[in-house]
Structure formats: C-alpha cells, structure tokens
C-alpha cells in the first residue's frame, strides 16, 4: 500500500515509516515538517531499495564492481584492485598449502561482505557527490538532481554486462595461475 501523505510504501500494519502516517488517518509526530532529503530526491523510487539494502544480491555478486558501475570510478577501481589482491593472496596461500576447497569458502565470505557494505559505501559516496553538486548548482537543485540520477543510470546495464565479462576473465586468469602453481607442486 502506498502512503497517501508522502507517496512511499507503507508497511504491512498500515504505517508509513517515512512520514508517520497511519492507515486510520493519524500522523505520528506532526510537529516535524515533511521534506524529502537530497538522497530521496536523487534516488527517487530507488531510495528504499538502495538505502535499506534491498538489492543486496546484485551488490554481493558484483562486489566492488558495483561501486564502479554506479559512477564512483576512482573509489570503485581502488576497491577492485584491493579485492583482487586479497583474493589472489588467499588463492595463492590455499594453493601453496593444497587447500583448494577453502577458495570456495573465501569467495562466499567475500560476497557476503560485499552484499552487506556495498550500498552503505554507495550511499556515503553519493551524499558527498550530491553535496558538491548542490554547492555548484544551488538554483533549481531539486529538479536538476532527479535528472542527474536518471542520466547516471542510463548505461547501468551496459556497465554491468561489461564488467561482468571482465570479472569472468579475471576469474579465469586466477584459475590459470592456480593451475600453474598446482602443476609445479
């Protein structure tokens, strides 16, 4: 059910977590004015999905590539490099001690961590970029910020496919390295 007061989704008990509207028509804490935050304006209908981590599966599978694809290129690239180096370290250790089954556990643990923190990182980076954008463009900020998010998301599927392929190539490369080390032993 959609809240008639603010337009956000209400929970199953008929209460809006966003503005305090209840299904009986009462509003809890009416002294506070209802204003949409900059993040709500930027994300639009994706606000709940991103802030409440409802898209955890995509964030977990993509790992640090999720941040890169969401237009935070420098931080995303740094996280991809760090994740790749840590993964290479664990794979090399496991190959050296002939414990290849631990690679699967590491990969699952790694993806769970990324599923948990990716949206938090994305929200913090987006808040910072919105703040900078607001300082540069104070006039008509409310209208411009919604268009900026739509423009940022146009090539998202293309980015996911491209970086998914790059991730697959990196995985194959790591597997070749592990096979090489295994053949030496």
Image (cartoon, grey):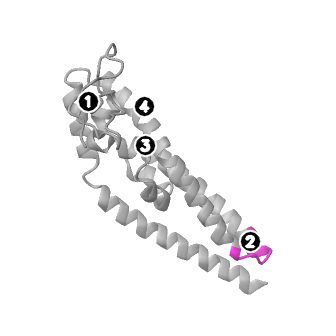
Q: Is residue 116 above or below residue 133?
A: below
Instruction: Determine whether, in the image, residue 174 is placed left or right of residue 120.
Output: right
Residue 180's spot in the image, x, y percent? Answer: 68, 82
In the rendered structure, find residue 24 and report the number of the disc placed on it.
1
Q: Foreground residue, 52 or 76?
A: 52
Q: Foreground residue, 180 or 95?
A: 95
Residue 6's spot in the image, x, y percent? Answer: 24, 30
Which of pointers 1 and 3 indicates the residue nearer the eye? 1
Return the disc, 4 or 1, that comes first in the chain's sequence.
1
Return the disc, 1 or 2, that comes first in the chain's sequence.
1
The span from disc 3 to disc 2 (Cα, nearest Å) is 35 Å
The span from disc 4 to disc 1 (Cα, nearest Å) is 38 Å
Q: Secondary structure at mark 4?
A: helix
Q: Which residue sits at x=72%, y=70%?
A: 92
Residue identified by numbered label 2: 94
Q: Secondary structure at mark 1?
A: loop
Disc 2 crowd, CA 10 A, few/some/many (<14, 14-19, 20+): some
Which residue range is magenta in the image?
Answer: 93-101
Which of pointers 4 and 1 indicates the residue nearer the eye? 1
In the rendered structure, find residue 128 and report the number of the disc placed on it.
4
Q: Is residue 109 above or below residue 10?
A: below
Disc 4 crowd, CA 10 A, few/some/many (<14, 14-19, 20+): few
Q: Which residue sits at x=24%, y=52%?
A: 154
The span from disc 1 to disc 3 (Cα, nearest Å) is 26 Å
* Quadrant containing the N terminus in the rendered view: top left
Instruction: Name which quarter of the figure residue 31 lies in.
Output: top left
Instruction: Name which quarter of the figure residue 41 lies in.
Output: top left
């Amino acid at each position: 059910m959609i809240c008639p007061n603010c337009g956000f989704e209400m929970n199953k008990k008929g209460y809006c977590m966003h503005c305090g509207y209840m299904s009986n028509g009462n509003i809890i804490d009416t002294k506070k004015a209802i204003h949409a935050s900059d993040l709500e304006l930027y994300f639009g209908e994706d606000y709940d999905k991103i802030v409440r981590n409802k898209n955890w599966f995509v964030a977990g599978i993509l790992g640090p590539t999720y941040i890169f694809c969401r237009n935070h290129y420098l931080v995303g690239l740094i996280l991809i490099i760090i994740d790749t180096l840590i993964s290479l370290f664990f794979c090399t250790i496991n190959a050296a001690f002939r414990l290849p089954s631990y690679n699967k556990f590491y990969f699952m643990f790694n993806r769970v961590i990324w599923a948990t923190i990716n949206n938090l990182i994305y929200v913090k980076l987006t808040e910072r970029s919105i703040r900078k954008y607001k300082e540069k463009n104070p006039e008509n900020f409310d209208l411009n910020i919604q268009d900026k998010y739509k423009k940022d998301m146009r090539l998202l599927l293309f980015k996911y496919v491209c970086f998914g392929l790059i991730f697959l190539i990196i995985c194959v490369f790591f597997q070749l390295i592990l096979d090489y080390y295994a053949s030496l032993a």
